Amino acid sequence: MPYTIEHRVLPEYLEVHIEATIVPGKEAQEAIERWFKIAELCKIEKRNLILAFMDLQGQHTTDSKFKLVDTASTLGWLPNYKLSMVVKNEKQQHHLSFTETAMNTLGFEMKIFKNKRDAKKWLFTE
């Protein structure tokens, strides 16, 4: 498994740090595993606000992005979860924009940022 997930439980939200190397042929499976673990953490810690710091090496295929979004609700990702994601650079932001758009279209709240300040501000807006 070429990824790590670390988390901190804060009074109002869950902070998650994800580092991953995308392995061709396993993109969808590993992305689904990562987000299943985060959904479980939300349930265990009773948090619906998530501030995630994502550092991806490599690229997901379009097919793997569809599979991840298509299985979001079956992974335990609930419509009341609000995901604010901070990425390292513009390239990662662009790479994840399809997932952001698809998740929002399906009724989930997700937004991608390049800095923590903006991500946290959005996370706490109604």
Image (cartoon, grey):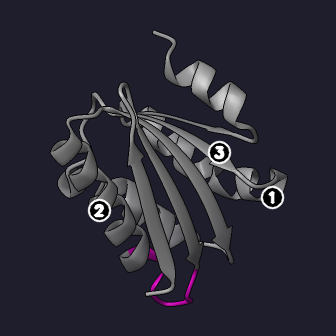
Q: For the residue labelled by badge 2, is the local secondary structure a helix, a strand or a loop?
A: helix
Q: Do the residues labelled 2 and 1 touch (CB within 8 Å)?
A: no
Q: How many labels does the image show?
A: 3
Q: Is residue 27 left or right of residue 68?
A: right
Q: Does the magenta stretch mainly form a helix, a strand or a loop?
A: loop
Residue 13 drawn at (x, y percent)? 39, 32
**Three-letter amino acid code at disc 2?**
Lys
Dot placed on the residue nearer the N-terminal end, 1 or 3: 3
Task: Kindly indicate the quadrant of the structure image that contains residue 117.
Answer: top right
The residue where tag 1 is placed is: 91
Judging depth in this view, the residue of 95 and 115 nearest the camera is 115
Residue 4 drawn at (x, y percent)? 48, 73
The residue where tag 2 is placed is: 37
2, above or below 56, in the image: below
Which quadrant, please, contains the N terminus? bottom left
Magenta segment boundaries in residue numbering: 22-28
Judging depth in this view, the residue of 95 and 51 nearest the camera is 51
The residue where tag 3 is placed is: 86
- Disc 2 crowd rating (10 Å Cα; few below 14, some 14-19, many 20+) is some
Q: For the residue labelled by badge 1, is the local secondary structure a helix, a strand or a loop?
A: helix
- Answer whether residue 97 is magenta in the image: no
How far is mark 2 from mark 1, CA to CA?
Answer: 25 Å
**Three-letter amino acid code at disc 1?**
Lys
Q: In this view, does 90 lie to the left or right of 112?
A: right
